[in-house]
Amino acid sequence: MCHKNRIGTLNFEPMLRFFFPLLLIFLLCTCGRAPKSELLVGKTLIIPQPLEQTEGQGHFAIAEDLVISVENETQGSLLVSFLDQVNDITGRRPGVMVKGDTKFRLTTDSSLPPEGYLLDVKPEEVEIKAADNAGFFYAIQTLHQLLPHPASGTPHPAPVTSHPASGTPHPAPALALPPVAIKDAPNFGWRGYMLDVSRHFFTVEEVKQVIDNIAELKMNRFHWHLTDDQGWRIEIKSYPKLTSVGAWRADRTNTDENISDWWGRAPLQPDEKPTYGGFYTQDEVREVVAYAKARYIEVIPEIDMPGHAQAAVAAYPEIGCVKALPAVATGGVFRYNTINPGKKETYAFAEAVLNEVMDLFPYDYLHIGGDECNKEQWKIDPDAQRMMQEQGLKTEEELQSYFIRRMEKIINARGKKMIGWDEILEGGLAPNAVVMSWRGEEGGIASAKAGHEVIMTPSKYTYLDLKQGHDDMEPNLGYSKAHLSTVYNYEVIPEGFTPEQAAMIKGIQANMWTESISDWGKYTYMTYPRLFAVAENAWTSPERKNWDDFIQRLLHANERLDGQGIRYAGSAFTPWIHHVGVGDGIEVRLETEANGLDVHYTLDGSVPDTSSAPYTMPFRIGPEGIVRAQSFINGEPVGYTASLDLPIHKAAGMAVADAEGKALPKLSNLQYARLTPVDTNWHKFPANEVTLTLQFDEPTEVSSLQFSTLRYTISGIYPLVEVEVLGAAAGAKFSSLASLDQAAAAALQGRNKVSSQIDFPAAEVTRLRVKLKTFNSIPAGHHKAGSRARIYLDELVVE
């Protein structure tokens, strides 16, 4: 007998009549209940810091039927990015009504300053006021930062999804703006960002993304560095070979961020075809200019001359000097790369090029470059010397000034102003020129006091291509340093300036040179978070700036970058491992740029966590010598794990002397050098051959020697070609223990530390002798070819 037949014999109709209404009520109250939406409320952690900001209570919910009132279609178009952002998170797009009256509205207020705005978020309404469309645009950029973002960073594709277990509707999150009243306006009118597209070529879409990045931070000038030795990137119809020839170079791209070889890349070979490069057509330039204009950004082109012109001269040799290099540069060059200021062909070229460029850019400024012009060629070029004689010029610096003044006349004739790097001061400043002060602040100070407009962009504070952390723990990108705290704490107006002099400072600009950039991830890593700091210096008044407050807002900004999958530097949160040799041991001190972090460390090579030793004061390390440290906020790691190998070895504290008997304590004092030639822990030998003797206190068994040398070939500092290690027991003569030939590695150009290790059969000795040799003549084709190389040597680690 089956269960089906048994059930079929029973009469359930009276029971169903009684229980069905109860069952329906139960289902409606339980299984049929739709889950509530998750409410995400934004935070008032805004970069750049507004002029005034007052927090409120509650929140403004972005309802499903929200409609935003605007006065005209232009205001409506400014809202598109905000509407897209809401839609990306919730799957719902707010409406827009022209000349409506809703609880979210945009209203013109002519009493507000240019680019300024008021943003008032209350639980019942949102109101935005501005005097111009730029002000509305910047208010909307602030709105972007006030919107919450899902922790995962992944937007909901539709307003309703299914719960994976039950299949019941699962709504997308509801959004709310935090209550805040903001009154805001910029501190400077020039808030700039320069992108070098010659060294690394960026596509049109990538350039647009860069423009979006700076627009989000209320920056309003995009300085487009379009020409340099390594590529000419803008179409010039009257000189077509500038792009058919000058836009292309031999591909020597290095993608390994541990190797820095910009200075020393092999030039184009006789039968080689140049394959790396690209350029922007004039239509593409117009497209970029229009794209930037829609974001209230003026595009300022730079055509670099008379130096940095190897690409132009490769395309048109008739504008070059004697000894001109024949091909577009593959890497760094510093000589034989100028156009000729003594030839009529040069001035015809410059006038045609500048006029075509000015036709494409509708704004008031054109950048002429004028920097790093090596005048060796001019001193021996007959045309350059003839021009000096004709014009009564006494020096090549005056010849450059003569050239720059002629360029300014071309630019002024079109009603525009010329900008140049601060080298245009040399030999006399052109009468109406604007100076970009990059080699420090001195050029800008002198120019402002002389009544010239100045844009402050000193490399120490604004060059985003420089390293931003510990030399040995950062990617090997950049040749110097510009730490986040240094960038942030820069005072744009020099101390002691009068109000009249301060008025000559137009603003500040960040510069991204791209010698070390080979992909988008490296670009974003070097850009963020320092772009946040420069943007705040440009927008925010000094009295509103605060480093600790900036760090709290930066943490929130980093969460947004994480959500978008954007690579950035965590260097300001990463511990610096400082050390000093103390007798036969090492004392370690840890610090971070950001304040208030919990730092934990290990000495056994393991990765630190919150159960590891907390850092409270300097400590001594054991023989393992491996220090690892990690910062934490509320138990969560921030920044990177810092790690240094600091071996305490058998020769620590032993006497080391050179062939003349001079003591060299840096080679055994347990103080290890960083990847920079300015580190005083390097022992710097001016000679290319060195003999060292290490004396032990007692007979010691040894079996290896390790050391680091510095490769910094732009300065003539090279690793070792040959090494020989000799040992001697008490009263005995030296005998060879081992030798090392690393000529091939030594011949590579670049900038990095080179570690060497020589192993040999264990021997008991009282003395070691180490013979070191590098190039007596730096190889042909190198930056300092023919010169004698120098040796920078670190600790002699003996085991």
Image (cartoon, grey):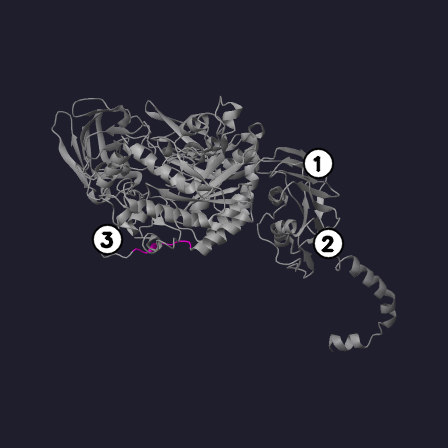
Provide residue 434's location: percent of width, then percent of height: 44, 35
Mark 3 Cα shell of 10 Å, populated few (<14), some (14-19), many (≥20) = few
Residue type at mark 1? Gly
Q: Identify the secondary structure beneath mark 2.
A: loop
Judging depth in this view, the residue of 411 and 588 nearest the camera is: 411
Provide residue 84's location: percent of width, then percent of height: 61, 53
Judging depth in this view, the residue of 573 and 81 nearest the camera is: 81
- Which quadrant is home to the N terminus? bottom right
Cα distance, mark 3 to mark 2?
A: 66 Å
Confirm whether residue 303 shows in the render. yes
Q: Identify the secondary structure beneath mark 3.
A: loop
Cα distance, mark 1 to mark 3?
A: 67 Å
Tell me the magenta residue range. Answer: 274-280
Residue type at mark 3? Gln
**Quadrant of the image occupied by residue 782:** top left
Judging depth in this view, the residue of 451 and 30 nearest the camera is: 451
Disc 2 target residue: 65
Is 510 left or right of 228, judged from the image as shown? right
Q: Earlier in the sequence, mark 1 or mark 3?
A: 1
Question: Looking at the image, do the residues carrying marks 1 and 3 touch, with CB atoms under 8 Å apart?
Answer: no
- Which quadrant is home to the C terminus? top left
Is 331 left or right of 299, judged from the image as shown? left
**Quadrant of the image occupied by residue 699:** top left
Q: Earlier in the sequence, mark 2 or mark 1?
A: 1
> Is residue 275 covered in magenta?
yes
Cα distance, mark 2 to mark 1?
A: 24 Å
Q: Earlier in the sequence, mark 3 or mark 2?
A: 2
Q: Which mark is residue 269?
A: 3
> Is residue 667 covered in magenta?
no
Q: Nearer the viewer, mark 1 or mark 3?
A: 3
Disc 1 target residue: 56
Residue type at mark 2? Asp
